[in-house]
Amino acid sequence: MADGILGRLSVDSLAILHVFKDPTVNNMVDSGAAGLVVIGTVLGVLILTVTGLWGRLFREWLFSVDHKKIGIMYIVLALIMLARGIAEGVVMRWNQSAALGGGPLDPDHVGQLFSTHGTIMIFFVAMPMIFGMMNLVVPLQIGARDMAFPVLNQISLGLTAAGAALLMISLVVGEFTTGGWTAYPPFTGAVFSPGVGPDYWIWAILISGLGSTLSGLNFAVTIYKERTPGMTLMRMPLFTWTALVTSILVVFALPPLTACAAMLALDRYLDFHFFTNDLGGNMMIYANLFWMFGHPEVYILILPAYGVFSEISATYSAKRVYGYESLVGATLCIAVVSFMVWVHHFFTMGNSATLNAAFGIATLLISIPTGVKVYDWMATLYRGRIRMSVPIIYLVGFFFLFVIGGLSGVMLANPTIDYQVHNSLFLVAHFHNVIIPGVLFGILAGIHYWFPKYFGFRLSEGLGKLTAYLWIIGFSVTFFPLYGLGLMGMPRRSASYQDPSYEPLMQVAFYGSLIVLLAFLMVAVTIIYSIFNRHRLSVPLGDPWDGRTLEWWTPAPPPPWNFSAPPPVSEIDAFAAAKESGDAYVPVTKYEPIEMPHSTPIGFIVLFCTTLIGFALTWWIWWLALAGVVILATAVIGRSFGAGGEIVISAEEVAAQDARWRDMARYQVGVTRDDETSSSNIGRAAPDIVAAE
Amino acid sequence: MTAQTSMRRAVGLLILTCIAGAFLGIGQAVAQEGILQAPHTFLEPLGPIAEEQRTHFIQVLLWTGVALLPVYLLTPIILLRYRRRGGATYKPKWEFSWGLEICIWGLPIVIVAALSVQLWDYTQRLDPYKALPGDPVCVQAVGLDWKWLFIYPDEGIATVGELAIPVDRPVSMALTTDTVMQSLRISALTGQIYAMPGMRTAMNFKASEEGDTRGENTQYNGPGFPEQRFTVRAIPVDQWNSWIAQVRSEGLPLSDENYARLGIRASQADTAEEMGITNGGPIYFNEVDPILFFRIMNRYHTGAALDLAQQPGSFSYDPASAQLPAEPMKMQGSGAEGCGNTGQHTHG
């Protein structure tokens, strides 16, 4: 069946043609989705060609090793994938709202939808969002010029994007797995899933997982080695703390995932028997390995969001964060315990009661530091001067909604209860309830908060508020009904159901998903509106929110080298202290020349080659996979010979740029927080704390 | 501290106590009046295990709810009182208080300690592997795509699509599959447990009330997954005896050939039709090999690779070429006959 030239590929593999062969509703959705990807790509190419931006796209973005640009590209990638993930969510809600006695979509299509939805949302939305935000913020918060390994950083982005590209290709060519984002064998083995679906999953996970591991190492080294003089570990901003702990988790948690995906690949390609039914294979090992990754993964995603909440609760209440040591300690507790709870994902696998009880209690333990964090943020607001800005709306939404997710998590941690609600929509409601109000709200708050730093203008406050409320309402209407349905017994991943009592709540959830879709579109509207009004919203002096940490101590956008001279740090919130004493913008007397790394195409070559290799392996086109490996190896080895040499920016040029900004900031009258959202806010703050004294 | 502030604190504390009391009262009402209801689930239990699961569920809900109270009560107060331009005390450098710190760590620690004690107790008591007192009915469940086969080895019968059990007599169920992993749940009686090929898992439960309820697979296993449901009938023991007699007389023989036909990827309805049962009801079997369950497990332990045609549930499965081994799987510590749920956990 495998052809020497095209492998398993044939005309039938093109999803876009299915509707012409058999125009059912199912095939219209299938081909329509594939069509959207193709049209989107063609449109993108056309726009770039007409506007003549190809050169700039490559020179200034794709070849850049600047952590700020890489961060923005991560987030753009995540937003594109989020568009698809949400669209799939809405389609699934629509299908289930009409699925009494059989839904409009084929069960197999539904299987692909929930599998791509989960894979995309975890690996290609949440992970790139987190890495994007860490890229943007961490080097600036620690007063560094860039990452420890800027080129490796670019390669990590290339690897992540290659995984995302495979997911997009699977929509157009062939099919995706129906085995869920966890890809449990033996269902995903060659015996029960002979098609290309699980292979797309395997290569997307292996390639992007490599990128994540390298990113984790890069951030850990950057935070250990690149901090500005005076910034001890216990003076680091809390977002950087969470980024450090997340990086450590990534380094330890990704290898089990890589191992189990690679073992599944060996089973499927080379007839191994790690997880097969026969010859001693055992799928329980897969479940253990997967969740040894999977549970820390939850904390990999949420810890940086906690970091964002720590930053914004302090900034928007114009006050120090409450319990810095407590928050750091809680973060470390979570990191350690997160590796000790993985069995709670399969209490129902026939473990002994004692084993289940031990893992159940370990799971309960995690709720202690998590609860502490929530109380700490409340205590941070206490006796502050709170501005109900967009990030605070997300924070309050997080408080009210996330704790319910925590409550259902505590319930699921009890094996006796888990025996009942495991694999039901209760579980689906639970993890959406922690990931959306936790991770996503944190990221959206972070985007609103840090956007002006990198683009030089604020996002519209009014539209931002509307968007935040839509997210809160949309989430609640979509996912609270699922708790009810889960308790009514509805299993997850059902393409249809026979119990008419499920139908009303299903329909409510569908309408909720439309509100979520609207909220997502409003994110785009907010950004576009703000671009058109950027002059009115511009904040070139770089400190629009009366920030407390080092990233605000630069112009907006910051120069490619971030800091013209290493910023002095002698306490937590060094910038707030400098503003209070009045010497934040005093002239610097001595500048040094700055060495900057060259742009390089290597990350883009890695993206191209690994996508090619993943695609070729999926379709058994061996010669193409080999070609990809050869090109990749040549490029990487070749670069190691040609590398070296840096662009040197002279001390005079650095001094000229820096002095211009400092002079402007020094002579500018700061705006009080009352005028924070007016056009008079150009990024020079009159701190509340000074006015109060 | 002025008299005014201590007065304010006392009033605040009083209000908090009242709200907490009201919360617990509502919780008690929920627990007793049965506001949480859903037919065919543990919220409307038919047996003691599910009933205890429900009690535990409500207890955890209430205990954890206590940790949520400060968030719901204090967040609006803080946001209102400490809004910018609200004129309340502003302490921009306040960052720590030992008293507050002890509360912040103490409250979750106390709640988690209480929950942990309960968790340990319930998990041990409701361990699905633990035999219930009394003379159990043995049922062996075999997961197939997309139906369950229930073997009653002591009665020499088997069914697909219907599980009948006598009220007030414990049921000891052993589970395996002859395809991918599945999960069997009968919510109104007990929870769920995974069933895996070549391995045996177990569940012990009991019906204390008569009634029909639903059992289902909750682990996605392909397009027929949502149809993999069955009726559970908890009936008085005399009715159960006549049900057995009925199955025995009406059933098809569960020969190796007929068993092999059950392994084809198809829903219960399609399989019944293929076997000539047109009333849409369950499929009954007699002449059941008492060691069939263990022969099915042994399919994956012969030391030889299975080819695609021999694997039930695969696309290329061919019932004609799929021979079950004649020998049963050798189980440690228990005889090959019977359910053999003697406290052992998942193993092959």
Image: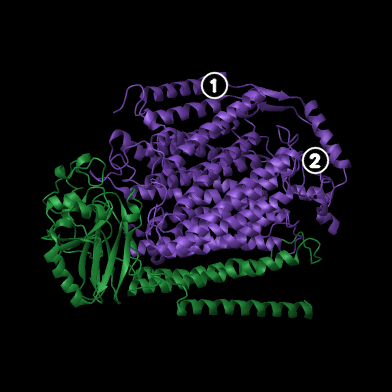
Q: Is residue A370 left or right of residue A205?
A: right
At 48% from the left edge and 62% from the top edge, which residue is drawn? A504
Q: Are marks 2 and 1 on the same chain?
A: yes
- From the viewer's perspective, is residue B120 above or below residue A253? below
**Number of marks in the rendered image:** 2
Q: Which mark is residue A541?
A: 2
Residue matched to label 1: A639
Measured from the top left, where is residue A554 in percent x and y?
Answer: 75, 39
Colour pattern of the rendering: by chain
Colour that chain A carries in the picture: purple
Q: Is residue B143 left or right of residue A653?
A: left
At 56% from the left edge and 71% from the top edge, which residue is drawn? B66
Question: Please, what is the three-letter code of the amino acid marked with disc 1?
Answer: Arg
A236, B87: nearer the viewer: B87
Chain letter, colour green in render: B
Residue A599 in view, yes or no: yes
Q: Quadrant of the N terminus of chain B?
A: bottom right
